[in-house]
Image: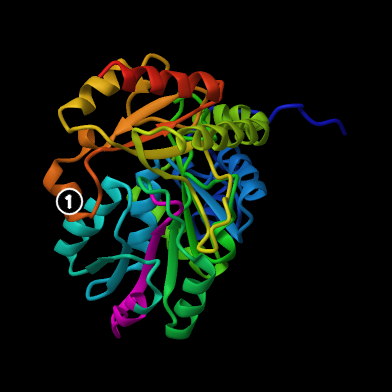
Amino acid sequence: MSKPLREPLFKTTAFAFNSFVEMQAALYGDSKDYFYARDGHPTLEALEKRLLEVEPADFAMVFSTGMAAISTGVLALLSQGDHVIVQKEIYGPSRLLFEEYLSSFGVSSSFLDVNDMKTLENSITPDTELIYLEMPAPFTLSCAPLKEIRSLADKYRISIMVDNSAGFGYERASQYADLVAVSLSKYPAGDSGIMGGALLGTQGWKEPVEMARSTLGGIMMPWDAESLLGEMENMETQLELIARGAYQFRNMLRGHPKVKNVHYPEERSGRNLRMGGFVTVEVDISLMDVPRFIDGLTLFRKGVFWGGSIPVVTPLLASYRIEVLKEWGLSPTLIRFYTGTENPELLYLDVVNALESL
């Protein structure tokens, strides 16, 4: 029998049964029949299967946003009295989740440099249940040594969760992590038209995550899942183009006299990972000149979005106060560029012109 070329959209959030027996079996969990979109839907499952082709794991579950996926995963893993080791440099809302919300429920967190294995091991307590990482780090783009951290976690029987949004399609975090979170609003969605998130993980965490998703309700809508399936058809080709441009842009920036440091994803051995479209630079200009430099750029949009074809510039000074950046050990003149699919030579000339206009 022939099959549809594109995955069909089942435009419903609820399902009816032919009999009491069928209904009871579904609601008791004794059958795989669908009954409500929050607990399973054929279009969502089609997207979940597609995600597993990119990031192989035992299961995948989709959510309404990336933060819905992260918060659901964390709540499925942790209980009152647990301790979490958190990578010091992570996405702001994720840090707020650990720092403000989980602490009020009796979960303690230690923020530290996870690249320092000695400090990492010394921070483990009898209550430590989770090591939370982001790959790569959002500002300095450093890549945690996942293989070494996996060995340490196994030694102490600790779980690992990785936000692999910026590495999705480039590096497989699932080979080292128990649970992987991905913002589907980024590379899978392209140019910011759809919101979504996903969790991919090992079999042991499937039931807790499934129950937490059903209870907390952060489910993706079927029509968003169908749209994402369409957007992902050419994602791998797009990712290759984005990574190539970012790498060339990074090499050009290294030679500019006003650029003090260039950050780009690397392994601890120094091998470039060609991961994603990010390049972060520390520019040799005053804090007063940062706004003028940003406003002098013409090819980069100003914002915090990324993942599609559009180049974006995100100065840390616009997102965080100086005292916060100093507390985190980050320079207030750090500026993150996302290159998209624009010609890297044109992007470099845009930076040069903006610097010369100061």
| Residue 14, above or below 121 | above
- Front-lying residue, 79 or 191: 191
Q: Which residue lies furthest to the left in this view?
A: 323
Task: Indicate the secondary structure of the residue bearing disc 1.
Answer: helix
Q: Is 88 or 333 nearer to us in this picture?
A: 333
| Residue located beneath label 1 in the image | 326
**Number of callouts:** 1
Relative to the observer, which residue lies in front, 147 or 155?
A: 147
- Can residue 103 be seen at all in this image of the molecule? yes
User: How far across and down, in percent of the image, does residue 268 sit?
Assistant: 50, 63
Decide which of 35, 66 is in the foreground and name it.
Answer: 66
Magenta span includes 130: yes
- x, y percent for residue 36: 47, 43
Left or right of 272? Residue 97 is left
The stretch of residues the image draws in magenta is 119-137
Q: Is residue 307 left or right of residue 218?
A: right
Q: How crowded is mark 1: few (under 14 residues within 10 Å), some or many (20 or more)?
A: few
Q: Can residue 12 be seen in this view?
A: no
Task: Examine the rendered structure and indicate whether residue 342 appears above or below residue 81.
Answer: above
Q: Quadrant of residue 88?
A: bottom left
* Quadrant, the C terminus: top left
Residue depicted at 29% across the width and 83% down the height: 125
Residue found at the very far right of the displayed protein: 1
